[in-house]
Amino acid sequence: MSLVGNLEELGLGEILQLISLSRKTGVLSLRSGGREGTIVFRHGLVVKALSSASRMGLGELLVQRGVIDHDTLDKALELQKERGFSEHLGIILTKRFSVVHETIEEVVREQIEQLVLSLFTWLEGTFDFEPQDNIEAIDEGIVDPLQFMLSKGLNPQFLAMEGTQVAQAASESRAAVEAGHDSGGTDEAEISFNLSDVVHTPETIPEEAIARPLVIVDDDGTTLKTLAELLRENGYEVHAMTSSEDTLIRVDNLYRGGGYPLVLVDLIMPRMDGSGVLGGIELLELLHNNFTDIPIVVMTDYHHAEAEKRVSDMGYRCVMKPHRAECSSPESLRAFLPSLLEALQRSEAGEAARV
């Protein structure tokens, strides 16, 4: 999964959700107004964050927090220099100066949280995520002012939840300034973010007040539009998506908000990196790994024995829809509707697919 785009089109919170759900290892790079930011992931968890707006090194941070004194820092830096900077400062402090590893990790964890939250104020700019298999290569390949990578990463979805509040506040502040109201003249690079100050109150809607949410994904616009209309006529609250990325974000948002959606996935569509034709399998596996208790139905207009077996092995139903050439006719999709509704209803009832 490779992601490239503009922050105006896909916000940092949504990007973090995608990487978290896909459990990828790699580097997310952000650029905005001459500033650069980097977030490093290991299996979908945040293990490192850098920002050109914050240059405080690990040693200075530990001194500031009272973990070590200046004399200890000077000795550790001298030892690091003698070794040709081949060993990270955090490791030297742990091995040679008896600084508790967990203490260093906790300090860095708090700093990473603040750095990531500060990146949410970058409302414009570009981003790209580059997957990498070797986390050690990532650690060695980035000049890191903190010189430390967390062994236990941070949950990106938690950061996304908190960061959304930060982004909203930044957007409101910008709007006030543009409207001629003075926001206090605080430079955003100097803003201190305290997680305890950010309160998230999820909006919940009584289940009986809304129809069952159904997320449908199909890269064919005609099929998607017609099926969405037919399913709405049959009482579903339909969320129509054309890509796996948007589907993951929508399912995750509905699930965390208590919506417990039903999902309808097209088997034959591109993967998230744009390659191949079995993107539905890739999406299904991500949904299966992250949302084990939601009902999912797969539809396809082309038999693929191996793919259909993988769908069945995961316990999901697969239904045949009309060929794409026939989907331009609403009548063909309306004729397909009864078998689709039956599959959806059986999945909602928790009936396992027949192998």
Image (cartoon, helix red, strand yellow):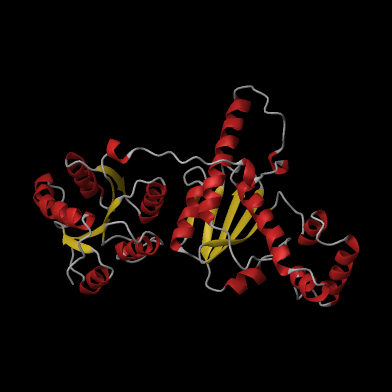
21 or 259: nearer the viewer: 259
On the image, the x and y values in percent for residue 295 come to: 27, 57
Question: Where's the C terminus, which quadrant?
Answer: bottom left
**As drawn, which residue projects farthest toward the top?**
180
Q: Is residue 6 left or right of residue 182?
A: left
Q: Is residue 6 visible?
A: no
Q: Residue at x 47, y 49 (%)?
A: 14
345 or 170: nearer the viewer: 345
Q: Residue at x 60, y 50 (%)?
A: 31
On the image, the x and y values in percent for residue 285 come to: 35, 65
Question: Where's the N terminus, which quadrant?
Answer: bottom left
On the image, the x and y values in percent for residue 74 come to: 89, 65
Q: Is residue 81 visible?
A: yes
On the image, the x and y values in percent for residue 266 come to: 26, 58
| Quarter of the rendering containing residue 279 | bottom left
**As drawn, which residue projects farthest toward the bottom?**
83
Q: Residue at x 45, y 56 (%)?
A: 18
Q: Residue at x 51, y 62 (%)?
A: 44
Q: Is residue 57 left or right of residue 274?
A: right
**As drawn, which residue projects farthest toward the right?**
71
| Count of marks placed on residues | 0
